[in-house]
Image (cartoon, rainbow, N blue to C red):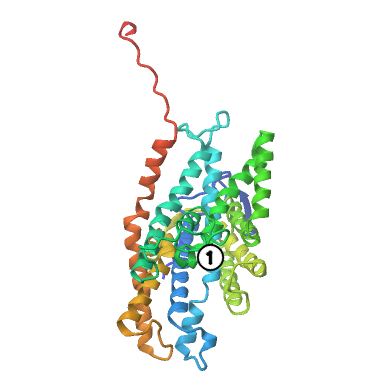
Amino acid sequence: MGQLQLASQDFLSGGTMSATHIPAIHWQRKCQLDSTTGCSLLISLMRGLAALQVAAAHLRAEMFPGLRDVASPPVYYQLLAFGTGFAHQAVVVFFLISGWLVGGSLLNKLERANTSTGTTADGASPWRAYAIDRLTRLWTVLIPALCLMLLVGVLTNVVDPARADFSAANEYSAAAFAGNLVGLQTVDVDNFGGNYALWSLANETWYYIQFPLLLIMFTSRNRMRQGGAAAVLLLLGASLPLSITLYFALWLLGAAFSRIRIDCRTDTRATLAAIVVASSIYFRVRGHNDDLNTVSFLQDLVYSLPLLVLLSTLHAPVAAMSSPMRIVARIAHTLSEFSFTLYVTHIPVIKLLRYAGQTTFGRDRLAPDAPLEYAVYAGMLLTLVVAAWLSYRLFESHTFRVRRAVKHVLQPHPRRAPMASSSMK
């Protein structure tokens, strides 16, 4: 199979690698976020596979007993359990990529902003544009997912529409719904409808808020703004769970490495890739693979650094690809497009599938010692992917239209110059 060939052009200086082949590190004023670079291709592949990994892991945990609960697990179940046991690392990848893309995008917006007016070329505030981008990105996907969770609760007889309970203790309440929209799940309210995959969106939401505050604190020329941003950051640090604040460091690493370009040889990239794979497998077997907390932070940092360094070596544009690599690129792009929808919708679909199994066949679990059950598992996983793709087509694919409409309403429009009167013609 042909290899992905990367152009070696140095974007900043126009130079190339030195004859000694020592990796050269460059700081970029603007990170490359388009789809023409090697890191964009790898990010798309990782986003899609990470979402698929989380869905497969949760489906296996919901449908099969735990590996330790099986006295003599067959080899094929051990392989399935191992292969679907990287959900922890997948969430870490989500945080790193989010920092890289979201943080890098904001840094680019600020770089393009007019330093004298504090606005972009179209007259819009980069901070307002950033806020609109983040809210539309989250809510265009999250609101339909929460509605789907509520619908599944009604269909499975968990929720009685005739008896509304609006208390925060009820995971289907309006308070839980609103709280999940603003990142309060695992902080003040439960994951809506028991959709436990939503916990990481609380992290993401607060990182979207903390990052611009951090930038204001260090870059603003207004002392009042700097002090206010620092005070809010301290308040958030004291109020949020420690794990959220701690993993903000990994998110920030993703943002920082989006501005770093490393020129190196192919064998260096291969070594970095091998380190990433080896450390991922090692921590899968020996590490802490449950919640992301103070216990798991150090191992996740060790896993994250070589991955970010690898991404930083792939900033050059893709020069040519073989036919197999073009197929891989297409699959990566397609999976990444609806990866967010897959992440937030797979739990309600799993609950619906379990309910259908219980009502139709009298059981909602699969047997690990029956080979045919693995075909059922594969079919259910395909159902999760298809359902997510349909939801993507209905909602997430329209994110940019929603964003444009919101910006049209909220952002100021440039004034047109008054037309000259006829007497001046």
> Is residue 94 at least partly visible in the picture?
no
Q: In the displayed structure, does residue 272 sit left or right of residue 179?
A: right
Q: Secondary structure at mark 1?
A: helix
Q: Residue at x 47, y 31 (%)?
A: 123
Q: Which quarter of the image is occupied by the C terminus? A: top left
Q: Residue at x 52, y 73 (%)?
A: 86
Viewer-nearest residue: 318 or 42: 42
Residue 227 image position (x, y, % from top left): 69, 39
Q: Residue at x 43, y 88 (%)?
A: 368
> Is residue 398 at least partly visible in the picture?
yes
Question: Crowding at label 1, few (<14), some or many (≥20) Cα neighbours within 10 Å?
Answer: some
Residue 190 image position (x, y, % from top left): 52, 63
Viewer-nearest residue: 349 or 159: 159
Q: Which quarter of the image is occupied by the N terminus? A: bottom left
Above or below, comparing residue 44 to residue 16 in the picture: below
Q: Quadrant of residue 423?
A: top left
Question: On the image, numbered disc 1 is attached to which residue?
Answer: 91
Q: Residue at x 59, y 65 (%)?
A: 268
Residue 393 image position (x, y, % from top left): 32, 57
Above or below, comparing residue 362 to residue 269 in the picture: below
Q: Residue furthest bottom?
A: 72
Q: Residue furthest top?
A: 423
Amino acid type, mark 1: Val
Q: How many marks?
A: 1
Residue 150 image position (x, y, % from top left): 39, 63
